[in-house]
Image (tube, coloured by chain):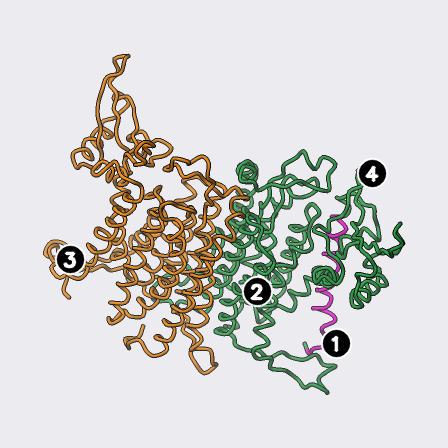
Chain colours: A orange, B green
Amino acid sequence: MTTSAIDRFDFFTIAFDILISIVGSIIVNRLIPILKEKFIKAQLWGNDLNKRNSKEVKIAESQGVLAAGIFLVLMFIMIAVVFSEHLHPASVFPHKKFVEYLAALLSICCMVLLGFADDVLDLRWSVKLLLPLIASLPLLLVYFANYHSTTIILPKPVRPYLGQQWNLGILYYVYMSMVAVFCTNAINILAGVNGLEVGQSIIIAISILIFNLIELQGVCWEEHLFSLYFMIPFVACTFPILIKNWYPAEIFVGDTLCYFAGMTFAVVGIIGHFSKTMLLFFIPQIINFLLSVPQLFHFIPCPRHRLPRLDPELNKLNPSEVEFKKSDLKLLGWLMLRFFSMTKFIRYREYTNNDGERLISTTNFTIINTVLCWFGPLHEETLSRILMLIQIVFGSLLTFFIRYYLVKFFYDS
Amino acid sequence: MTTSAIDRFDFFTIAFDILISIVGSIIVNRLIPILKEKFIKAQLWGNDLNKRNSKEVKIAESQGVLAAGIFLVLMFIMIAVVFSEHLHPASVFPHKKFVEYLAALLSICCMVLLGFADDVLDLRWSVKLLLPLIASLPLLLVYFANYHSTTIILPKPVRPYLGQQWNLGILYYVYMSMVAVFCTNAINILAGVNGLEVGQSIIIAISILIFNLIELQGVCWEEHLFSLYFMIPFVACTFPILIKNWYPAEIFVGDTLCYFAGMTFAVVGIIGHFSKTMLLFFIPQIINFLLSVPQLFHFIPCPRHRLPRLDPELNKLNPSEVEFKKSDLKLLGWLMLRFFSMTKFIRYREYTNNDGERLISTTNFTIINTVLCWFGPLHEETLSRILMLIQIVFGSLLTFFIRYYLVKFFYDS
């Protein structure tokens, strides 16, 4: 990696990236109505459970595949443009940089394929965890080939006890593949309200984009330029999806969009060398994941759907609940229930049924239901807006605060 | 590229490739019955039009996606193994070689995604031509970065007039992208009989594999080793598909398999530097394409399906026909009809209907119908066997004859 700053050619490529992204955005916007019937005919449709007329309207699913498809096309063109600088025999072709683009797109393309296959075929959970792991292998190889530094600098307060730095060795690669698996699935878990999946994706993408723009002036400008090239078309291609998926949704985004977005963030974080900052942008998703653990791992019974429940009279959403016998709960489950209840993430009540059994009824363990516990009942659009606000405040603003202010107390500048 | 021969590590990787390919083959074989119902539930099924009970049986479609998915997983693992040799910081990582693997897999993965999307959504022809073109961009960049030689050696007989060699320049890149587009679609056009798509793919793959094994002893051993790493898992993963797609078919392969196979051959041909030999393996597909031109470009009317027609009494297949007014035929169409009739590729007849109009009825322009014109009516399995034989004789054996015998008269050894 050189340390010289970005040059005229880089400005040209950024401008070109913006230009084709606008074209891509228009194309995605046009494709949605054109292909809608094809999706419905292919059985790729669903009912919007949070609507009064849910049974009557078929809403096209998996529309994320349109954004992902056009995104891939734009990125293929971008690669050709970025490396066109070296398209004369006298130039030394920058293979190191080239492998980063190829590995990134390969991982993303694999996850789009997985997402679309999941939408069509409804795959098992184990597949959704295993395949991102395998798809991250080329990324890890690229990391090894181009950097192979696995040393982390420890924060100042712990240095007297643990030393200046640690070499994590193979654990660093384990960490990176976990980032890929986590990101790919994180957006998919925080889902179920109009506009939520694609809305959070775009907020994260714009946050990364701003972060890249700031860091373009730093020494790692090349990594951030790389990330920028991906984020601009990402935002452009997913924006028309947000418009049409926002309340009241005309389309659904499908797992395709969640996996596509998650893996795109993972690759720019890993190859762009800012995986820790990138994880901070996922704070709401991390909290939602931790909150979901009791149900995902069946310490607390988990119903098939944990979506909010519509009150048709008010046309507002209430938290959904799950009911079970108190005697079915093991010690760990009970402790988790108490912990999340005390921290106000869930609300539960105990009562005795006609047979004299003690029952527990608790709101489901997702931050969507948490928001409804605090402020509900809410209109679906209001709920979406609050969740977007949470993403902006606890995902983006908090991250920038940590990254540019708090960090001073833990690391040398 | 070095000129040293393959070493112990390469033997180890080949052995490992064979080992995981066997495992992959077993997995594909297991997945087919497990996932069958999911495909049918997702509306991915079809009727076998060449069977007496065609309407009664739902046959799962797009099973090629299983082979392609497992193939990709195997190749991700293979990359890690092939480059594990360089996984110590003292070793110089071979970026040049690495980009070839990544670009190859990226192009293949994109075409699998396109194929599966086509199976689900039934895309337009223009998309099927345009997307392989775009997906071939990284391949062309890799070719440029690693070789950027666009000079072809001319055959001896024309040298006195045209010189020893020609530098095709940009035309060489146009040629390579045309190879990618042609291969991706060629297998899809020669289709419609049980076992045909996957059968011809496996014959081509085994031919490439044999060619690679022969050439491993030559100076371009590294390119052929590259191709070998792809062909072994390809044959292994598609073999269970052939077994179940052979007459009477329990499954259909879908466009996914055709695009997957075609692009895999294109990338090994381009990056392995044997695109001309590779095209020779496609002689039956090229002839079928040339024969199809009059109907594909509507010089002769083209019905929606050009599959053979079942005679339910005999349970044998006859060539399918298309009927039209003689007056609708333009001069070029008439010349094409006459040419292919004289060369015995089609059979047509003229007659007058009750209104006194001159009509023409001709067999459809595919080599499947040609075979039925010559030997028909045939049982479907016999037809498949003859088409496989054509592939072996005119695709494989003829190519080896040209490549290792005839070539002496045109080029210096």
**Chain of the residue displaying label 2:** B
**Label 4 crowd bin: few (<14), some (14–19), many (20+), radius 10 Å:** few
Please name the residue shown 66% across and 65% down the image: B279
Q: Is residue A398 visible?
A: yes
**Chain of the residue displaying label 3:** A
Judge by depth and name the residue closer to the eye, B169 or B295.
Answer: B295
Q: Position of residue A321 (x, y in %)?
A: 29, 30
Q: Which label was assigned to residue B314?
A: 4
Label 1 sits on residue: B409
Task: Give the mark nearer the N terminus: 4 vs 1.
Answer: 4
Judge by depth and name the residue closer to the eye, B54 or A92.
Answer: B54
Q: Which label was assigned to residue A155?
A: 3
Is disc 4 in contact with disc 3, using a CB cutoff of under 8 Å?
no
**Label 3 crowd bin: few (<14), some (14–19), many (20+), radius 10 Å:** some
**Chain of the residue displaying label 4:** B
Q: Which residues are magenta?
A: B384-412
Task: Give the mark nearer the N terminus: 4 vs 2.
Answer: 2
Label 1 vs label 3: CA separation?
A: 73 Å
Against A352, residue A369 (above or below) is below
Against B92, residue A175 (above or below) is above
Label 2 sits on residue: B224
